[in-house]
Amino acid sequence: MNLIIMGAPGSGKGTTATVIREKFGLDHISTGDLFRYNIKENTPLGIEAKSYIDKGALVPDDVTIRMVEDRLKNLKSDKGFILDGFPRTIAQAEALDKILEALGSKIDAVMYVVTDDEVIIDRVTTRRVCEKCGASFNIKYMPSKVEGVCDVCGGKTIQRSDDNPETVQSRLDTYRKNTAPLIDFYAARGLIVEGNNNVSSDTCIKEIEDGLAKLGL
Ligand code: AMP
């Protein structure tokens, strides 16, 4: 089963993706995580990506598409994948179609996490992520057991450099302009499964699980 998860930055995509990935044994491919790994390792890709990420802008399509293509050709699970944070432009979605066609594969559903802007800004500015394994916490709503220490791997939890109110606003603007049109792109194929994440991730996940089941997944 091959899925995409979409939603505004900070909408709660990562949390939903983790639950769905575990339920179905899927490979989780997060472009944001891949960029952050490359930044941490100081690779040429990381150095290029950082200048865009720090501004809340998108990394250019050609760089991003190449990175995802490479990852899709080397999947770790034979059960399928969740793409998280990709595609973010129509050009990326069209490139994805071609890559999957060449691999004899396709997208089965697009999970759309719906969250209001006020909720996003509040949640993102209080979010903390593990430096080591990427697990996500929130100092207000979902704190780690020991402050600053990841519950999953014991790594250090930090605030992402792009999780400040100014950058979040430009990430939301970028999302509206470039990424929101993808909802119509996939709705036209009947692939959208929606979950509302304004109240809790549990209700969002339940709605998405029900939607996937209705598609026979
Ligand atoms: P995320 O962790 O998904 O919020 O991504 C963090 C940042 O990485 C974004 O604000 C972009 O700068 C960059 N990024 C992640 N995915 C993509 C993508 N598909 N296309 C372009 N830039 C991306």
Image (cartoon, rainbow, N blue to C red):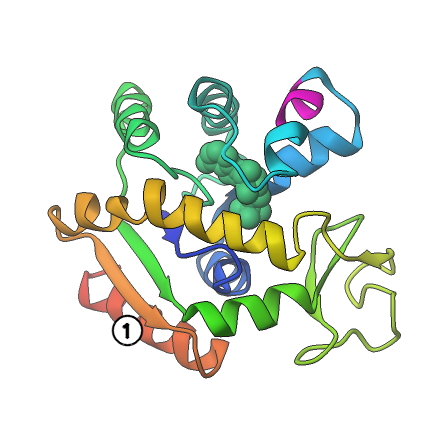
Horizontal placement of 80 versus 216: left or right?
right
Helix, strand or loop at label 1? It is helix
**Which residue is nearer to you in this view: 94 or 69?**
94
Point out residue 86 in the picture as x, y percentages from the top left corner: 42, 39
**Which residue is nearer to you in this view: 95 or 89?**
89
Farthest front residue in view: 166
**Which residue is nearer to you in this view: 162 or 214?**
162
Q: Residue at x 80, y 48 (%)?
A: 132
Point out residue 126 in the picture as x, y percentages from the top left corner: 69, 69
Horizontal placement of 11 versus 141: left or right?
left
Horizontal placement of 2 versus 65: left or right?
left
Q: Residue at x 28, y 73 (%)?
A: 210
Q: Could you tell me if residue 1 is visible in this image? A: no
The secondary structure that most of the magenta stretch takes on is helix
- Total of numbered circles in the picture? 1
Point out residue 145 in the picture as x, y percentages from the top left corner: 83, 78
**Which residue is nearer to you in this view: 170 or 154?**
170
Is 135 above or below relative to 106?
below
Q: Could you tell me if residue 160 is visible in this image? A: yes
Q: Residue at x 87, y 60 (%)?
A: 154
Point out residue 96 in the picture as x, y percentages from the top left corner: 32, 29
Quadrant of the snapshot with the C terminus: bottom left
Q: Is residue 132 magenta?
A: no
Q: Residues within 10 Å of mark 1 (few under 14, many from 20)?
A: some
Region in magenta: 45-49
Residue type (three-letter) at the residue carrying disc 1: Asp
The residue identified by callout 1 is 210
Is 154 above or below relative to 204?
above
Q: Residue at x 65, y 28 (%)?
A: 51
